[in-house]
Every structure is written in structure tokens, then in C-alpha cells.
Amino acid sequence: MIKRRTSKGVYCIEGDWWGKPHRQSSVQPMLELLSKWDTCPVRYICRDVATRDEFDHYLIQCTQKKFASFPIIYFAFHGTKGKLHIGDGRKATSTVDVQDIAETLEGRCAGKVLYFGSCDTLNIHGNELNGILKRTGAKAVCGYKAEVDWLESSAFDTLLLGEFQYNALTRSGLHAVSRRIRNKAKTLVDRLKFRMVVK
């Protein structure tokens, strides 16, 4: 019998994928599926954002002490190289650079994982990623280096968020997660160009 585990909660900040009310894409059903997992029901919080002000508000909130049991910060947005896209793409404030995120989160992410579930966002130099870890204090940063299919990336996100539940969020534990996900889902890892950098 598989031992039940203590959930490592997921704090998800999700963008408005299409800006159209009849298109209701969301990662929330995937998070709900994880919350029903018998081995380790994963607790989650999902915050919808459509503006930069909302994004900045939840970015600070997710690191508050009362959310310490949600150490996985999951950004679900459209993205491009080094950036997330929030809300109306016609506005300058609709794009946020990962370095801006690191500045906002400076020293606030001890023991946390930053997961960018967005196209191409982590297609940046490894030195930048190490700088984000150093600045924020996070244990790991992970995400995609390629444009990704929404359904495929959602399936991969489900697997990865589940794999985080099996190990402590330590250097050795996170390396174990990285090895396991590459063994279990090599095709998706390669296609999505998934990467994880551990502090």
C-alpha cells in the first residue's frame, strides 16, 4: 500500500488566456484533479489575473507567511523569451519580465519552487536563472524553453506537480524529481524543452 503524503501546496497565478468570455481555458481543472489524488491530495490556490496590478498583488501575497504550506508558485500564462504576458497585449504593462518578478520577490522565496508554465519564458541564459535563484532565495526555477501546446503542457504540468509531492524541496530532492520526470515523460520533456535549475 502506498503511504499517503503531506501535500506541498501549489499557489497558482493564472492569466486570462484569450481575453474572450466564450473561451474558458484554465489550468484549474488540472489542479482540481490533483486535489482528488488519493496518494497525496494536493492543496491549491488559483488566482485569476487580468492586469499588472492584480499580478503584483498576488505575487507578493503568495510569499506571505500564511501561505507557507504552498511552496510551489505556478505561473500559468502566455509567454515569450524571458517574459510573461498578462491581460491586454496592447498595453505596455501587460508584459512582465522574469527579472522584474525576481526583483519583487527578492529574498521572499526561501524553500520555494518557481514554476513558469508558459511558452518560451525560460529560453534565457543559465546565468540569468541562477541570478533569479540567488535574488529570490528560491530552491528551484523551472519551465519551458519552447512554444508549447496548451494541452500537452497541461498534461506535463499535472505530472510534474505530482512528482514534487514525493520529495522534500531540497537540492537532492529536487534533483530526484528532475531525474524522475525525465525518465517518465522524456518525449514531453524534449518537445516542450523543459528545464529545471536547482540552487
Image: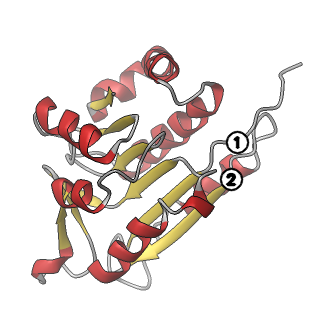
Residue 169 in picture, x, y percent from top left: 53, 31
Quadrant of res 131: top left
Q: Quadrant of residue 79?
A: bottom left
Q: Is residue 129 above or below residue 49?
A: above
Q: Which residue is tagged 1? A: 7
> Where does label 2 land, which residue?
43
Q: Position of residue 170 (x, y in %)?
A: 50, 25
Residue 23 visible in the displayed image: yes
Viewer-nearest residue: 57 or 137: 137
Whether residue 51 can be seen here: no
Q: In which quadrant of the rendered image does the C terminus lie?
A: top left
- State the SS at label 1: loop
Q: Residue at x 48, y 16 (%)?
A: 172
Q: Position of residue 35 (x, y in %)?
A: 71, 51
Residue drawn at (15%, 30%) of the image: 126
Q: To which quarter of the image does residue 89 belong? A: bottom left
Q: Is residue 148 above or below residue 20?
A: above
Residue at (31, 47) in percent of width and height: 136
Q: Position of residue 85 (x, y in %)?
A: 23, 67
Q: Is residue 130 left or right of residue 81?
A: right
Q: Residues within 10 Å of mark 2 (few under 14, many from 20)?
A: some
Is residue 109 shown left or right of residue 47? Answer: left
Q: How many marks?
A: 2
Q: Quadrant of the N terminus?
A: top right
The tag on residue 63 is none
Asked whether the residues under the numbered discs 1 and 2 touch, taking CB atoms below 8 Å apart as contact, a structural biologist would say yes
Could you tell me which secondary element the residue under label 2 belongs to?
Answer: loop
Check the image and name the residue furthest to the right.
1
Say whether residue 57 is left or right of residue 81.
right
| Type of the residue with mark 1 | Ser
Q: Residues within 10 Å of mark 1 (few under 14, many from 20)?
A: many
Amino acid at circle 2: Arg
